[in-house]
Structure formats: C-alpha cells, structure tokens
Image (cartoon, rainbow, N blue to C red):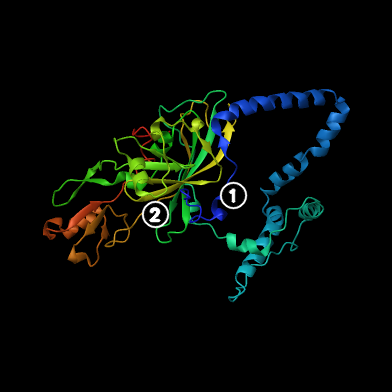
C-alpha cells in the first residue's frame, strides 16, 4: 500500500521523488567531501595568477548582471528583456486555447520609438549566444495564472520565540505543508512552509502547522453549544513516513495504533512524533508524506531541501529561534450573509429566519437578529480565529510586533 498517496497527488505538483536520504549520515558524507575541496584548492594554487584571472574573466557574468540590474529600473529596456518570455507564454496560451476562440491580445511593440541607448541594449540581447531550453507545447497544461493561494501572507520570515538556536554543523530541513482542495478533492495547495533543524522533532513540525482544525471550539452542552474562548481537546494526529506511523503519543492508544488496526497492510509502529528527531529519519525529497489529525483533516508533508546551516547566509538573524516559517497562504474569510462586508464570526445552524444552514454571520448582525428569539434547537458555532501559527507561535505565546 502506498501511504504517501502518490496515486492521488500528481508528480507534476511535487516533482519526481529523490533517492532515500539518511539525514543523520549527511555530516559524515560532508566530511568526506572536504577532502575533495582541499584537492581542488591545491590545484587552483598551482595555477599561475594570470591564468586564474583569465579563467575568472571568461566565466564572469558581472557585465551582463549589471546590465540587467540597470534594465530593471528602465521600463523600456525591461520590456525588451521580458519580451521573449511574454511571447513564449502567448504562444503556449494560444496552444491551450485552440479549441476555443482566441482573444486578440496585447501586441509587444518593441521596436517603436526606441532611443539609441535602448536600441543598443536590444542589439546586445539579440547577440547573447546563451539560450534557454525551448518550452514544448505540452507545457501549456502545467501553466496557469497566479491565484490567491500562491501569495505569501507574511511579510518576513517568522521565527519561534524561545525556539532552538542553530549552531555550526546543524542540518537544516525545509518542509512544505499541503492541504486538499475544498471543492476538488484530487488537488492540493500549499498551506505553509517551514525550516527546521535536524535535531528538532516531527512534533516541532506538527506544532507550527497553521491549520484551522486545531482551533475548533469546545462543546459545552449549553444552548449555544460551543465556547468560543476555549479550544476543543485534541483528538490526535499521525504522520506516515516511509512506511512508519508516528503518533502524537498523547494517549496509550493514539492515532498510529488506530490506523494500524484499521488497515489490512498496516505500517510499522514508530515512536511518538515529539520523540522522533528529524535527523533519525530516512526521507525522500519531493515525496508527499501523509498526515491525519483532528478526525478527518488530511495534509501532505513534502521535504523540499536538506542543507547545512551557514552563519550569516540568509536574511534571518543567527539568533532566530527555529522552526522558522517562510510561507503562509492567505486565509479566505467568509463574509457575513446579512451585510456582505464584514468577515463572519459565527456559523448559525438551524435558524429558519436566515434561509440557509449553516449561515455565516458577523457579530453585530447576529446581535441585531436577536439571538434570544432563535429556536431552542439553533446552534451557534464560532468560526476559527486563525491564531495558531498566525498570532500565536508554536509555544502558544502571542508574538511581538517589531
């Protein structure tokens, strides 16, 4: 049985998986490569200085880089640089729309009103011998316009307060979290992306996943039915990685035990996720690993990169606590059905006055409706506040604004 559900999730989303990588063995493999780098340095030291300068000048792209940076600030030259890419996309779009009527698109008037400086830049671009691989017509099936889920809702990389500080020799792992589409079950979209250290655990990864299912309100048994200020008790979670099920370990019979009992070809029982270090795993890059939590909420965990931590190598301060969050998809908030302007706070079930069930209502509109006039069997469910991973960090503390 394929627990990572590759049959359900196309390789076109994640790419082909890599070979199995022993994360804990990477430091030893890196130490072996240091000898090869030392040999390369010895070879370079034996080359004459003039010969080295000649090689550096031949391989340098500084002049081209400087020209492109200047073109980025000049609209006319920027259009010329972007022209080949625009024409390629236009051709692919026409290929994809052969069965439909083609709309007359915007023509790129590259040769109109060119100044001498701009024309010289165009001639320089035309003279570049380096070309990209041509894009086949079939690529049109994998190209689409930008969507809301592709945007990043955070302005800068988020660190974890009192998180783990990196040190020399640490393995850094990038993991992306995907969720199934609401209306198209066979599609997935990225929910968030995080960076963890190899000595951190699967539990550290699970704790920072910004999923609204983790914010379900607690049932109270009152007429309203739920307490908006109290979260429901966690039902459990399980991750399946390379045929091993890692439960949350919060109960004697956690989700991993229940999963093993239900399957005819069950995975092996692993340690609790909060006791399983990432550097103890053998994983594949670009392979979707299955995760289930809070009843029926599914996710796919994809490890994108494995590298060594280097001080001052990124915009993240070396004192930033890990795990880091580099991407969070914007949340689509439901608007109130009454005013249509304010995000809804409640989902009202069984109220005949609203004409639909559930009905999303904001606080002021629901108060104007008069909750005291609602039927006894009406239930008011508070909608998720999207605090976990947004306002609150992985430790459950409120983040400070800088």
Residue 400 vertical placement versus 132 (above, below): above
Say which residue appears at 57% left-offset and 55% top-offset: 12
**Quadrant of the frame with the C terminus:** top left
Residue 78 vertical placement versus 313 (above, below): below
Q: Mark 2 or mark 1, which is nearer to you?
A: 1
Residue 311 vertical placement versus 286 (above, below): above
* Circle 2: element type: loop
Say which residue appears at 35% left-offset and 47% top-offset: 212
* Circle 1: element type: loop
Q: Earlier in the sequence, mark 2 or mark 1?
A: 1
Q: Residues within 10 Å of mark 1 (few under 14, many from 20)?
A: few
Residue bearing mark 1: 16
In this orientation, does residue 309 appear? no
Residue 247 image offset from top left, x and y in percent = 37, 38
Residue 22 image offset from top left, x and y in percent = 56, 34
Give me the C-alpha separation between circle 2 and circle 1.
Answer: 31 Å
Q: Quadrant of residue 358?
A: bottom left
In this orientation, does residue 127 appear? yes
Say which residue appears at 33% left-offset and 47% top-offset: 213
Image position of 106 (left or right of 322): right
Q: Nearer the viewer, residue 400 or 113?
A: 400
Residue bearing mark 2: 332
Residue 376 image offset from top left, x and y in percent = 11, 58
Q: How many marks?
A: 2
Q: Residues within 10 Å of mark 2 (few under 14, many from 20)?
A: few
């Amino acid at each position: 049985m394929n627990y990572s559900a590759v049959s359900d999730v196309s390789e076109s989303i994640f790419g082909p998986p890599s070979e199995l990588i022993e994360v804990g063995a990477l430091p030893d493999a890196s130490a072996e490569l240091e000898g090869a780098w030392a040999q390369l340095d010895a070879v370079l030291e034996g080359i004459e200085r003039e010969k080295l300068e000649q090689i550096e000048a031949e391989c340098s792209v500084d002049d081209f880089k400087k020209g492109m940076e200047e073109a980025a600030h000049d609209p006319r030259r920027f259009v010329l640089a972007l022209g080949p890419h625009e024409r390629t996309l236009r051709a692919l779009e026409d290929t994809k729309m052969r069965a439909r009527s083609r709309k007359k698109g915007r023509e790129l008037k590259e040769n109109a009103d060119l100044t001498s400086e701009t024309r010289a830049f165009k001639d320089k671009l035309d003279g570049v011998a380096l070309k990209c691989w041509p894009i086949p017509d079939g690529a049109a099936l994998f190209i689409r316009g930008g969507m809301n889920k592709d945007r990043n809702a955070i302005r800068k990389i988020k660190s974890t307060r009192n998180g783990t500080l990196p040190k020399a020799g640490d393995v850094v792992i990038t993991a992306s979290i995907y969720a199934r589409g609401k209306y198209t079950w066979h599609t997935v979209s990225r929910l968030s992306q995080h960076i963890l250290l190899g000595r951190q655990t699967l539990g550290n990864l699970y704790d920072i996943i910004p999923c609204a299912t983790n914010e379900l309100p607690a049932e109270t048994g009152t007429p309203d039915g739920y307490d908006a200020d109290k979260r429901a008790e966690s039902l459990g979670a399980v991750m399946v990685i390379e045929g091993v099920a890692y439960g949350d370990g919060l109960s004697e019979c956690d989700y991993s035990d229940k999963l093993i009992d239900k399957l005819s070809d069950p995975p092996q029982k692993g340690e609790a996720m909060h006791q399983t270090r990432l550097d103890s795993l053998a994983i594949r890059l670009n392979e979707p690993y299955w995760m289930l939590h809070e009843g029926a909420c599914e996710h796919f965990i994809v490890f994108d990169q494995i590298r060594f931590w280097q001080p001052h190598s990124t915009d993240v301060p070396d004192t930033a606590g890990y795990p880091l969050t580099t991407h969070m998809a914007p949340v689509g908030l439901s608007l109130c059905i009454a005013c249509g302007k304010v995000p809804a706070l409640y989902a009202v079930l069984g109220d005949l006055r609203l004409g639909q069930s559930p009905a999303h209502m904001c606080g002021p509109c629901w108060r104007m409706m008069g909750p005291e006039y609602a039927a006894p069997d009406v239930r008011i469910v508070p909608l998720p506040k999207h605090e976990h991973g947004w306002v609150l960090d992985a430790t459950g503390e409120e983040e400070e604004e800088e």
